[in-house]
Image: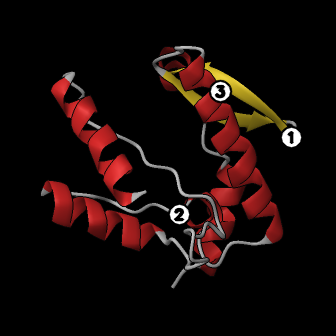
Amino acid sequence: WEQRMCAELRRGRSAGRRHSIVVIAEGATDRQQQPITAQYVADTITESLHEDTRVTILGHIQRGGSPTAYDRTLASRMGVAAIDALMDEQRSIMIGIVNDEIVHVPFTKAIKDDKPVNERLLGVLQMLSI
C-alpha cells in the first residue's frame, strides 16, 4: 500500500497538483494486521517523496483534547461529506454542521457571514481567565 500511495501522490504532482490530502481511517491496518497510523503515513511520504507533511486529527481540532465518541462520529460524517464533495467535483467549499446536519458552505459565504461576538460569553471568559 505504501508504494501505491506514493505512486498516486507522484502522479498528482506530475499533473500539477501542489497539495494532497491523505485520509486514514481510525483503526486502519495493513495485510499483516499492523496498525497504520497517521504519523507512519506522514513519515513514509516524507522519506519516499521528500515532501513536507502535516498530520491533523479532526477530533482534536473540533474541540481540543482527546476525541470523544461524538467527535469520532462527527469526524467520520464530515470526512465522508468531504470525500463526496470531491467526487462531485465541488470546489471552494467548507464542510460544516448546522442543527446536527452536514452542510456544504461556499467559502465566499463562510467568510462573508461573520457572526458577532457574544458579549455575555466574552464577559464570562474574562471572569474565568487568569
Single out the mark in the foreground, 2 or 3: 3
Q: Tell me residue 55's x, y (percent).
A: 39, 63
Image quarter of residue 69: bottom right
* Callout 1 amino acid: Asp
Single out the mark in the foreground, 1 or 2: 2
Residue 72 vs residue 30, the one in the foreground: 30
Residue in the image at 43% along x and 57% along y? 1
User: How far, Cα to Cα, is label 2 from label 3?
Assistant: 19 Å
Residue in the image at 55% along x and 79% along y? 34
Residue in the image at 64% along x and 78% along y? 66
Of the numbered discs 1 and 2, the one sitting upstream in the chain is: 2
Residue 36 vs residue 65, the one in the foreground: 36
Q: Tell me residue 98's x, y (percent).
A: 79, 34
Instruction: Say which residue label 1 marks.
Output: 100
Q: Is residue 15 left or right of residue 70?
A: left
* Callout 3 amino acid: Asp
Above or below: residue 65 compared with residue 100? below
Image quarter of residue 32: bottom right
- What is the crowding at mark 3: few (fewer than 14 residues within 10 Å), some, or many (at least 20)? few
Q: Is residue 26 left or right of residue 45?
A: right
Instruction: Say which residue label 2 marks.
Output: 57
Residue in the image at 69% along x and 38% along y? 80
Task: Say whether residue 126 is visible.
Answer: yes
Q: Is residue 21 left or right of residue 97?
A: left
Q: Are marks 1 and 2 in contact (CB under 8 Å)?
A: no
Instruction: Say which residue label 3 marks.
Output: 84
Task: Say whether residue 115 is visible.
Answer: no
* Callout 2 amino acid: Ile
